[in-house]
């Protein structure tokens, strides 16, 4: 190698060693990188230290602006002793001491139970914060803020005077238990999942404050009302002073109730979670039910059901009187219906026993109709112009086995018992099973007497024919017929 090449190579090696020596850069190392989005990077510069609990664990590699935003993205390189960094890690840009100048990054690696962040991960803006500097305080203390602060200090001073400070000192003995419950309350306010629940709380608070800011007049009236309320409470300082011991006793008594309420909150929370789908689905139900409610409201108007109710109110006494008067009629109708169902209908449907094989077990409703036909055929004499009803006798010897058909009751001269004092519905249907027997058994006299009676009847008919009474009757009927024709 020539002296020139050797000298040039020595100069390059010395330059590289000097660079790595002064910059402390290791080209063979691959440090852990962490990125974070900060709302305001302030005066943070590259190579600014990154500290954990005051110990420097890395450097800021670069600071870049976020497009279309006032925020910035900070890229940091961390040493091995800074690892691991968890997902719930937080970061704050803080000013260094006066002699150091500039800013540094205060990093908290997060809780061990959270997942570990991989290399080149990005912390979101909600996990980063800015420290309050003197310039921020001076910019916030404008004239109106300073006036409100003076008012607050003046009122606070007047509250501590005249025994207020002594009362505050006496109240310090209760601070331990009060702060303990306050800490429990604050921890509960974080929710079961602090990141998501707090984010939801902040989102809801943002919507609330946006709604308040959208109506300045309503916000001004709210502040005015609060001022009036505070003034009214201030004028009743004696009553408030007397109510404080009662409030203490109330809290002491109400603590078990609050404990029971706290124990019931998990169940209530589970119920709220289960009821949430039903509440969400109730909106379409309400939208569908509102038109029906509107129509129902119109239905209850003066010209609709309300007017009908008014007319019914007038007619109701008359209807009640009519119902009272209809009781005897309804009672008789009920008895008639019961008699028809229990007595008459079973009788009509019952069957008549008979000794004739072709006429046995015929229903009463059929035989009653047929009897009218028989009566029509038997109700005439020779010329069919007489109003008399003629019955032709039947020779018992022509019947089967000398028996009368149908069989007569035991005593034909004795009618069935008539009981008007007994309800028809409780009486038995008529008994169609009448006793049978020889024909002479049912005659009021013996067979000889019956034959003699028949001879007497025949003699009477012959006497009437010989006396000419039928001719006189015929002439009389003919005269009546002529008078009707006229």
Image: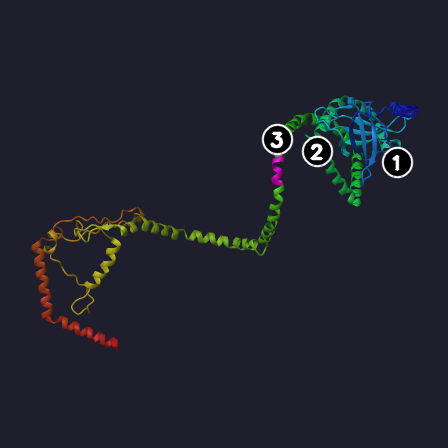
Q: Earlier in the sequence, mark 2 or mark 1?
A: 1
Q: Position of residue 108 (x, y in %)?
A: 78, 26
Would you place residue 318 above or below residue 140 in this image?
below
Q: Position of residue 465 (x, y in %)?
A: 11, 69
Q: Position of residue 451 (x, y in %)?
A: 8, 58
Q: Earlier in the sequence, mark 3 or mark 2?
A: 2
For image coordinates 39% across by 51% down, the residue present is 330
Residue 308 colored in magenta in the image: no
User: Is residue 283 shown to the viewer in this render?
Assistant: yes
For the residue labelled by badge 2, is the local secondary structure a helix, a strand or a loop? helix
How far apart marks 3 and 2 lie (CA) works out to 21 Å
How far apart marks 3 and 1 lie (CA) works out to 49 Å
> Which numbered tag is attached to residue 112?
none
Q: Nearer the viewer, mark 3 or mark 1?
A: 1
User: Is residue 412 shown to the viewer in this render?
Assistant: no
Residue carrying label 1: 139
Q: Earlier in the sequence, mark 3 or mark 1?
A: 1
Magenta highlight range = 273-279
Q: Nearer the viewer, mark 3 or mark 2?
A: 2
Residue carrying label 2: 196
Q: Nearer the viewer, mark 2 or mark 1?
A: 2
How far apart marks 2 and 1 lie (CA) works out to 33 Å
């Amino acid at each position: 190698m020539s002296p020139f090449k050797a000298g040039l190579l020595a100069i390059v090696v010395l330059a590289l060693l000097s660079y790595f020596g002064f910059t402390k850069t290791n080209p063979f190392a691959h440090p852990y990188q962490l990125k974070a989005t900060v709302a305001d990077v302030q005066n943070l510069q590259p190579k600014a230290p990154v500290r954990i609990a005051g110990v420097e664990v890395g450097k800021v590699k670069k600071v870049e602006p976020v497009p279309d935003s006032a925020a910035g993205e900070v890229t940091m390189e961390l040493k091995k002793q800074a690892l691991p960094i968890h997902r719930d890690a937080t970061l704050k840009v803080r000013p260094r001491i006066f002699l150091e100048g500039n800013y540094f990054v205060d990093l908290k690696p997060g809780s061990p139970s959270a997942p570990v962040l991989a290399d080149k991960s990005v912390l979101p803006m909600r996990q980063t914060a800015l420290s309050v500097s003197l310039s921020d305080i001076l910019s916030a203390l404008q004239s109106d803020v300073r006036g409100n602060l003076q008012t607050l200090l003046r009122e606070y001073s007047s509250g501590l005077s005249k025994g207020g400070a002594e009362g505050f000192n006496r109240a310090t003995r209760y601070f331990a238990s009060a702060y303990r419950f306050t800490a429990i309350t604050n921890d509960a306010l974080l929710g079961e999942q602090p990141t998501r629940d707090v984010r939801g709380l902040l989102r809801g608070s943002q919507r609330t404050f946006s709604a308040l800011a959208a109506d300045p007049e309503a916000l001004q009236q709210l502040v005015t009302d609060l001022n009036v309320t505070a003034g009214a409470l201030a004028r009743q300082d004696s009553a408030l002073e007397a109510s404080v011991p009662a409030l203490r006793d109330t809290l002491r008594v109400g603590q078990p109730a609050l404990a029971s309420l706290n124990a019931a909150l998990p169940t209530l929370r589970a119920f709220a979670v289960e009821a949430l789908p039903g509440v969400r689905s109730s909106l379409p139900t309400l939208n569908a039910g509102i038109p029906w409610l509107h129509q129902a409201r119109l239905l209850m108007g003066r010209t609709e059901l309300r007017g009908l109710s008014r007319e019914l109110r007038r007619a109701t006494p008359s209807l009640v009187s009519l119902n009272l008067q209809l009781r005897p009629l309804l009672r008789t109708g009920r008895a008639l219906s019961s008699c028809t169902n229990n007595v008459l209908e079973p009788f009509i449907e019952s069957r008549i026993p008979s000794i004739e094989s072709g006429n046995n077990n015929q229903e009463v409703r059929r035989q009653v109709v047929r009897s009218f036909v028989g009566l029509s055929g038997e109700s005439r004499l020779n010329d069919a112009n007489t109003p008399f009803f003629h019955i032709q006798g039947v020779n018992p010897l022509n019947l089967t086995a000398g028996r009368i058909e149908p069989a007569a009751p035991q005593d034909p001269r004795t009618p069935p018992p008539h009981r008007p004092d007994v309800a028809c519905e409780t009486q038995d249907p008529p008994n169609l099973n009448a006793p049978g027997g020889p024909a002479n058994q049912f005659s009021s006299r013996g067979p000889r007497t019956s034959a003699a009676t028949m001879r007497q009847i025949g003699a009477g008919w012959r006497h009437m024919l010989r006396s000419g009474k039928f001719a006189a009757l015929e002439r009389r009927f003919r005269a009546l017929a002529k008078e009707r024709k006229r």
